[in-house]
Every structure is written in structure tokens, then in C-alpha cells.
Image: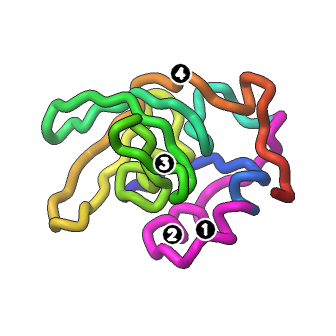
Amino acid sequence: MTLDLLIITEGDLALLRKLPPHDELQTELDRAIVVSSEAVPADVVTMNSRVHYVDETTGERRLVKIVYPAEADAAEGKVSVLAPVGAALLGLSIGQAIEWVFPDGTRRRLRVEDVDDQPESAGRPVALEP
């Protein structure tokens, strides 16, 4: 993990706190700066963002959408926020990278290359109450 700045919206944080406990995600949420949906920069990965990232360890590039567990669908590129990649990318901005230990014990470095679609910048922020 890294000590770089993470940004989470108030709406995302409220909904993420309702998920089952997840140590890695909780650690990231605890160190994040919480902002309103209106204040989040357009280059930050929020819930339901589509993000291009590169695994600098393997060189693999992917486009994924960070979603809540019930919406996850690998065939559609929808990655749960509770999955290693989802938890690692949430809150990062374009150009930021994070080192993350995966369940198989490997350490990878993931870097955000682009945020294609961020709900807040597209005028679709998450409500504080579902």
C-alpha cells in the first residue's frame, strides 16, 4: 500500500460503510480525504467509475468499472470494490499508483491511466441515503 492521497465522496463512504467488513478496504477508507460529490476532481476513481489502469508488475492494461459486490460481473468488466483491484483503485487519481498484496501473496503495482466515466463529473452523483 502507499501513503499517497486518496479521495472518497461522502455518498460513496456512506454506502461503503454498509458493506460487510473488509480489512483492506477499511484501511484505505480510514486514510482517505472525504469530500462532497461536487468537490471531487473529475480524475478521481469513485464508485461506478470506469477506469483504465496498468498493472506495472505484469504490464497488463485493463478497463474496469468499480461497482458494489451485487453488481460485479467479470465478463462485463465490472469489478467489485471488495475485490483486490477494486479496493486498490478506489480513490486514486490519474497518474497515481498503489502497491497491493493480492490473495495469492503476490505484490503488484497498479497505476491509474485514465478515468473514462466518473458519475460525479457526469452529473450522476450518489445520494447520501440509498
- The residue drawn where x is 56% and y is 76% is 20
Q: Nearer the viewer, mark 4 or mark 2?
A: 4
- The residue drawn where x is 46% and y is 53% is 80
Q: Nearer the viewer, mark 2 or mark 3?
A: 2
Q: Nearer the viewer, mark 3 or mark 1?
A: 1
Q: CA distance from mark 1 to mark 4?
A: 26 Å
- Residue 124 figure quarter: top right
Left or right side of 58 for 100: right
Question: Which label was assigned to residue 4?
Answer: 3
Name which residue type carries label 1. Asp
The magenta-colored residue range is 15-38
Question: Which label was assigned to residue 116?
Answer: 4
Q: Callout 4 environment at 10 Å: few (<14), some (14 to 19), or many (20+)?
A: some
Q: Is residue 122 visible?
A: yes
Q: Position of residue 97 (x, y in %)?
A: 37, 40
Please name whichever residue, 34 or 124, is drawn nearer the observer in this view of the structure. 124
The C terminus lies in which quarter of the figure? bottom right
Left or right side of 13 for 19: left
Q: Are marks 1 and 2 in contact (CB under 8 Å)?
A: yes
- The residue drawn where x is 49% and y is 55% is 81
Q: CA distance from mark 2 to mark 3?
A: 13 Å
Name the residue carrying label 1: 30
Q: Is residue 39 above or below residue 6?
A: above
| Among the two numbered marks 3 and 4 on one chain, the one whose residue lies closer to the N terminus | 3
